[in-house]
Amino acid sequence: METSQDMIALLRRRGIYDPRLLEAFAQVPRHKFVMPPHRLLAYGDFPLPIGHDQTISQPYIVALMTDLLKVQPGDKVLEIGTGSGYQAAILAALGMKVYSVERIPALYEAARARLEALGYKVHLRLGDGYEGWPKFAPYQGIIVTAAIPEVPPPLWEQLAEGGHLVLPQGSPGSYQTLRQITKTQGRWSATDWGAVRFVPFVHAEA
Ligand code: SAH
């Protein structure tokens, strides 16, 4: 059974060296983001169930995606797919202004109560993240934590100049490509970071 320190050691072995990022992982109590009986396994490098057929991502993927956002303290970051709130807490611990959207009411409520109890200031919204959160745009970083075939146009519009959008792009139910999309002078460039597996992004077409 891994401890928080084991998790940090593993992140280092897998190439996560940024001391600020490792410090955020050391600070955020991951076991509080999963329910018993999964709590004992909270610091292993694998995803875990959080109810409603959803999962909290494995620590390494949370670290990699956070790193790929290339954001600085004070930057605004939009997350689509709050889930347990763990990714949002890591971003908040790094000093970002975090905005996160979740579509499942029970997960939204649980994440809100949890983040508040732990003292993380995160702005949460219940709804379809396909539309992003225009009110606080633009965002220096946008992270999507559910598998999606194409980038929703509203998310591209809400990305700041020089910002990065990080998402598992591809069909749900199989593997997706972890993709980092950068906006430079309004133009798009993409870098791929390997295969990942995420739960589906659910978008109810109008
Ligand atoms: N980042 C989360 C893991 C998320 S799992 C964590 O740290 O725990 C993916 C989440 O995306 C699920 O909670 C799912 O309900 C949510 N989701 C899927 N489609 C969505 C959509 N269109 N808008 C908002 N949230 C969505």
Image: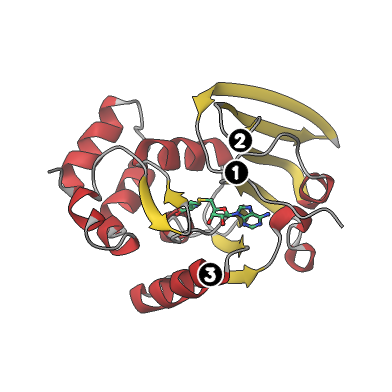
Residue 9: horizontal and vertical position, in percent? Answer: 21, 35
Residue 127: horizontal and vertical position, in percent? Answer: 69, 66
The residue pinned by badge 1 equals 200
Q: Quadrant of the N terminus?
A: top left
Check the image and report above or below for 130 versus 5.
below
In the rendered structure, the answer to whether residue 10 lies left or right of residue 176 reads: left
State the count of labels.
3
The residue pinned by badge 2 equals 172
The residue located at (49%, 58%) in the rendering is 83
Check the image and report above or below for 140 versus 185.
below
Residue 125: horizontal and vertical position, in percent? Answer: 63, 70
Q: What element carries label 1?
A: loop
Amino acid type at circle 3 is: Tyr
Q: Which residue lies furthest to the left in this view?
A: 1
CB within 8 Å, label 1 to label 2: yes
Q: How far apart are marks 3 and 2 (CA)?
A: 22 Å
Q: Is mark 3 on a helix, strand or loop?
A: helix
The one of 191 and 124 positioned closer to us in this rendering: 124
The residue at label 2 has a CB less than 8 Å from ligand 1: no
Q: In which quarter of the image is the C terminus?
A: bottom right
Ligand 1 quadrant?
bottom right
The residue located at (52%, 39%) in the rendering is 198
In the rendered structure, the answer to whether residue 154 lies left or right of residue 7 reads: right
Check the image and report above or below for 142 versus 84.
above
The residue pinned by badge 3 equals 108
Amino acid type at circle 1 is: Pro
Q: Which of marks 3 and 2 is nearer the N terminus?
A: 3
Mark in front: 3 vs 1: 1
Q: Earlier in the sequence, mark 3 or mark 1?
A: 3
In the rendered structure, the answer to whether residue 106 lies left or right of residue 38 reads: right
